[in-house]
Image: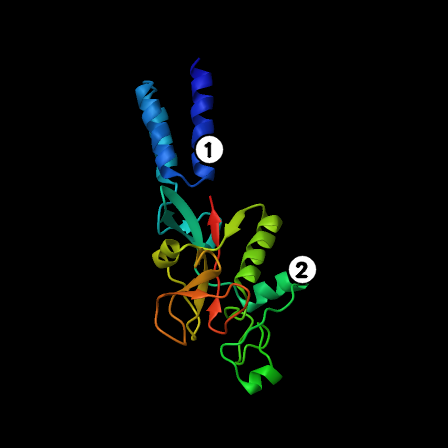
Amino acid sequence: MRRRLDKALDARMAQATSHVDRAAAQRVVESARTLGLPTARIDALVARANDIPGAGDALPGDASMRLVRSGDGLVAIAVRQVSRADYARFANATARPEALCRQRISLLRLVRPISWQTPGFAQSPSQPVVCVSWGDASAYAQWLGRRTGFRYRLPNAGEERALPATGGSRAISEWLGQCGNGCGERLGAGRSWRGPSGTRPLDPGRGYDDVGFRLVREL
């Protein structure tokens, strides 16, 4: 009987650890106390629960992501926006066509259109990709999920505010997963080099030279 209890508690604790769910781990500890397990056994479970990171901590195994609260649980959000180099790997692997990217109508840009590869200003491979549409960003998340086995998506407004993106000398807004105007538009959020911080409706079928994206990984 004791062996079965230990095995069940270990399985629940392992599940809580894999889902980065400290609250679930603490419930395992309370179950052990209720069952009257030995102090040494309870202390070992407490130590395992305390080792599970919380909001603001790095995602175990991936220091490029931080844990933030979302609803009743936690998700991991990338510290930095997806880079040109990262997006290039996706575009090359999937033969993704370039999105139309024009900030405003001008004869110069009609003759010489801009794209994520040539956004109209110099960028290094490590800087955030811009001129990608909402559809491009969502397709990237799905592609990365298929490659890694994790579930990725674009952040919502609360997640974006909980951990603003860092890095880059040119501030870049980012696509959100949420939509507006009956979902005929998608939302962009954050400060950009073109304007102040805030949320704005954007055409999901085109790119913007001041909008990139980050990913959220569900746990």
For residue 62, above or below residue 73: below
Dot label at residue 116: none
Residue denoted by label 1? 14
Which residue is at a point 37% across and 38% down the rendered structure image? Answer: 22
Residue denoted by label 2? 94
Residue 194 sits in which quadrant?
A: bottom left
On the question of residue 47 being in view, the answer is no
On the question of residue 15 being in view, the answer is yes
Residue type for callout 1: Ala
For residue 156, above or below residue 165: above
Residue type for callout 2: Thr
Closer to the camera, 43 or 100?
100
Residue 8 sits in which quadrant?
A: top left
Mark 1 surroundings: few (<14), some (14-19) or many (≥20) residues within 10 A: some
Q: Position of residue 103 (x, y in %)?
A: 49, 77
The secondary element bearing badge 1 is classed as: helix
